[in-house]
Amino acid sequence: MEYEKCYVFEPDATRPAKRRKIEPQGLQASWQLRREAYRAAWAGPQARIEDALLGVHDKSLDEVTRFLDEQATPANGIESTRIPSGIVLTGPGGSSRGSLANRVADRWRSQPNQIYVPLDSTVTPNLKAALKHVIHRATSSTQGEDEDDEDAVATTRKGRRLLNYDLQILADYVRERKIEQVVIALHDTEAIASDVLSELIELLGSWRSRVPFVLLINVATSVDFLQQRLSRGAVQSLDGKLFDAVPSSTEVQHVFTALTHPDTKVWIGPGMLSAALERQSDFISSADDVVEMAHYAYMSHFYANALSILLASDLKLKDVPLDHFDALRNLESFREHARSLMESDGVDAPHRVRGLLDHDSQLFKEVRGYISEGQAALYRITETLDIIREAQGLLPGSTATLKTTLYIQALSGKLAGSAQLRTMLLSIRKAPSDVVAGMIEAVRVMVVSHQIESASDTAGDLQELQNELMELTATSKRGAKQQPLRSEDDIGSSTVRTTVVAQKVQLSKQKSELSKQDAAYTVLVRKFTDVLEAYFSATLIDVQTLPFHEIFLYDLKSPHRETFTPRPRHAVERALATPHDYLACECCAPSKGQGEEATLSATQPATAVLYQLYLESGSLINVSDLWQAFQAVMSEKKRNEEQLMALFQRGLAEMRYLGLVKSTRKKADHIAKVAWKGL
């Protein structure tokens, strides 16, 4: 098993039949059009996501760039003996494609007199490897030493031969080319060993007078934790300035905003988005995972769903195969739509349903119209979520809920009429007039910007309420200073009365007498909440009731779960224990009464037979006994001993490659069992 590896090769004497090119048929006939539709549909979100991630760190990028420029030209021309260090608080998951470190790297590489060297835990197992990487990356423009060569040396002009981890090489390079800055960016500081990090900082500090080092340190935890990990000498070598980067949760919100655009073709469902955000939070990953989730969702939808061809912009009736119309008529939403038409009071409802069932042209026209209406309805939901977040932000003592959270609740049908909205409307009724005035103006502007025909009445009602409130506040004068109006629902408008009955204290609330302006304001603010409640009920609809929502809404979690959170060990164990599930053959199927476990048979692959014998063994397996058991099972087929030995050795080699067994020094003729099924 240590040195012998062989495979049985039995070539077939007959010549294999020539493969013919098979044209796709049925629902697969639209594959080419769906691929083009996928590329066109993903191009827009991809461009918007890249723009959003690039612009999210603009403010922090300007601050870090200004800091680096100041270090290139120190004040009063006096350079500090400490290393200027920019400590960037990135938070967990701050390594996305638009992260601050990557933005700084892209800008700094174009500077002629500056050198940018990224440094992470993969190239810093020890101090020597870290120095080799720094020197190699800094001088790679003119030198070509191999950083993996342990004996590589550099020759100076004076004839000295230096090892490739000597900082004198970098000092000579900086002096000859008049380099002003050598920026070293530590991307994942927490993953670098504490002793290596401390020694590296101390060494760079001792060379500060000869090499103009500047550090950019990404910190995912806190500055206090970083200080605890560093030695006293390393801390004294740093002259740090703190910068706050945008956390990954904010990046996720920007990505989500880019995915919910009026031009969006495929909308992400609540179940899949919830799973992706939960995974992003549990694994402390960056926004790139959410982008990959969305990209894979587009691919899965267009590649697996034949009806996604109807999302193509320039699609014509003749481009849709006939089988696709039959698939449309079998959709659950189409059946519900036809049932609702038949139950309606329309005179032409039966003729309309009959036309949808018999005529493909009528069905095609109606489907395209419902798809556009459904996409517009989903976008109205996201605009309503913006109104809710705006109202929450204007309320005193309240914070706006994340848009992704509201989106999941809205598309799940749990937001309309929820306790969260009722609490917000009650808080609005208790708010003073100055808060409500700003809220009415903000909501009115957002409703008008939506440009929805059904929202015109809402905008008109809000305009009337705004005019009434302005008249009330103009006529309300309380003393020398104008005070905001209070509603009847405000806790400040009620008093607590204390009475003693039979030596027991009883508390009761009593409404204070309201002024004429406060009473009018109470009526006005209640009208405002009624208008908001009606608007929320009209826009926050159940997306599952939209006709043909299966075409433009994707909410399948199983492909993403298998792709982004795979279980390779479970798959390998299942394939070896029940090979018939993958081979789709009856010869390997379990016998009656055996359950799901496969019965040992000579028709099964040799590795599967050995694995099932391996499951019945203890921690140490006698190879001779295993060979005899294997020979007894495989002897059903007429094979000689040499062929069986070849299959046995190949099966053992594959099990060792999978990490199931290993050699042991306890007994030379035994192998050790490494893994147990399910553990």
Image (spheres, helix red, strand yellow):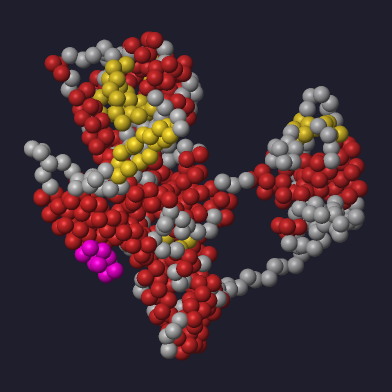
Front in this rendered view, residue 228 or 399: 399
Q: Is residue 535 left or right of residue 179?
A: right
Residue 646 picture location, percent across and down: 81, 46
Q: Residue 281: within the magenta?
A: no
Front in this rendered view, residue 121 or 460: 460
Q: On screen, 62 above or below 304? A: above
* Quadrant holding the N terminus: top right
Residue furthest to the left in view is 480
Seen at 50% across and 72% down, the residue is 333
Residue 632 picture location, percent across and down: 91, 48
Front in this rendered view, residue 182 or 241: 241
Seen at 33% across and 37% down, the residue is 496
Residue 456 picture location, percent across and down: 24, 67
Magenta residues, start to end:
453-461
Seen at 42% across and 12% down, the residue is 231
Seen at 45% across and 25% down, the residue is 190
Residue 503 picture location, percent across and down: 45, 29
Residue 230, by quadrant, is top left
Q: On screen, 85 above or below 302? A: above
Residue 511, by quadrant, is top left
Residue furthest to the front in view is 502
Front in this rendered view, residue 245 or 180: 245
Q: Is residue 611 left or right of residue 131?
A: right
Examine the residues drawn in magenta and state their main secondary structure: helix
